Image (cartoon, helix red, strand yellow):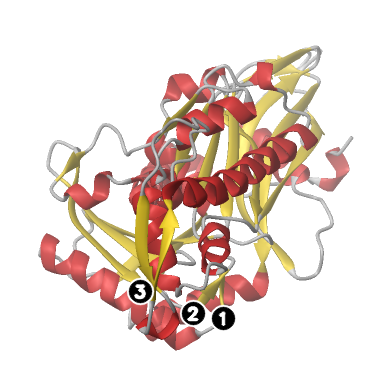
Amino acid sequence: MSQNVLAGLDIGSDRATCIVAEVDDQGILHITGAGQAQTGDSVRSGMIVDLQGAADAASIAMEEAESLSGWEISETAVSISGTHVRGLHGRGTVNVEREGDLSSGEITWTDIEDALETAQLIKLPRESVILRTVKCGYSIDKFDRLTKAPVGLRADRLTADIYMVTADRSAIQNIEQVIQNTGRKISSIFPAASAGARAVLTRDEMEIGVAFADIGASTTDIAVFYSGTLAYLTVIPTGGEVITRDLQQLRIPHSEAERLKKEYANVSGNEKHGESSITASTFGGRNSISISSEMISGIASRRIHELMEEIMNEINRAGIQQTDLPAGIVLTGGTSHLMGITRAASRITGLPAEIGTSIGLNMASPLAETPEFAAAVGLVLLSREEKSEYEGRKWSNPLENTIIRIKGLFNRLR
């Protein structure tokens, strides 16, 4: 696998999706392969419950993507979901070391790193680990909301604000084992919400304020952005599968319930969308029953109403109001295919709603443009950015990267 080739694998509760991308000589990213496979019962609510089943699905998805792209995947970025994935804010303040006769010290990259490290000094539950740390901004003395690191400025104190995403240690280890069982390696792990949002949201949306919801089979991954950075992330244990289970109460098997949901459910709330009678097979295929499209839509609409209310409740509990999100809410995931879901989302949340698809990319496969592939696409984008940042920091100042840090971090805390 070339250094200019990236892979992203999203293992969801319904299916595993994989994307392969290649960076050309001009630095342009091209999606060259895509693959998917059903995960069956190996993943529940975002959590791996059957290692081999999940590995088999991951292998099929990656092999499909490999066959289209012509590249063999040796390592891949992967997503992680589940209610154990959550975010919390951190703030760290350090004194800026004074130099010469000036009243304030000059801020260096070492000061920035110390403030960021201090912000992470939060006691986490024993089973949790920090998965990702997002830099939200800086403050110096009386000036706050600085988006860029204030290196070179003079100040008495420096404060760094971050947003940390944590995950369960065992869940991470299970994902690592799944990829190991496929004969490949993990290059990095990202929250599914961050990956999906990266693929479909624009910089303007993230600056002005936007909510993102990836509605899968049994989980909904939520992320909120404003001022250009992640402000809130959580996962709720509800998705489109609840509609399927409700439809099964009509005495039809899972496959038939899924078919009716995808083909006939209209959750727009428009009672005049038309009524028709649909024939569905009962359990065992021994008989058939007639179900009205109005009944199917009514069942689906009730569940979508509950889900949208729960999404807004989660966002409101974080102290974020509708007025903070003028760019509205962007939906992805398999459940976002439901007819009328944007109209329902807008009516219930009070926000403009749209379906998100991956933007600004050269895609050889139409699969990659569908909402359920957003997280996998976002994984390759985040991987590329992480790699570029690492290379940039590695070579930006070789001298600074080799000096011994002589300042004691804990002696400078405030």
Q: Which residue is mark 3?
A: 58
Residue 394 x/y as whole percent:
42, 46
Mark 2: which secondary structure?
A: loop
Please tell me which of labels 2 and 3 falls first in the chain: 2
Circles 2 and 1, Cβ within 8 Å, touching? The answer is yes
Vertical order, 124 against 90 (above or below): below
- Amino acid type of the residue that numbered disc 2 sits on in the rendered structure: Ser
Q: Quadrant of the C terminus?
A: top right
Q: Amino acid at mark 3?
A: Ala
Marks 2 and 1, Cα distance to the nearest angstrom?
Answer: 5 Å
- Local crowd size for mark 2, using a 10 Å CA cut-off: few (<14), some (14–19), many (≥20): many
Whether 132 is drawn above or below 313: the answer is: below
The spot of residue 377 in percent (x, y) is 33, 49
- For disc 3, the neighbor class at 10 Å (few under 14, some 14 to 19, many from 20) is many
Q: Earlier in the sequence, mark 3 or mark 1?
A: 1
On the image, numbered disc 1 is attached to which residue? 49
Residue 371: image quadrant is top left
Residue under the image location 16 percent in, 51 percent down: 365
Residue labelled with disc 2: 42
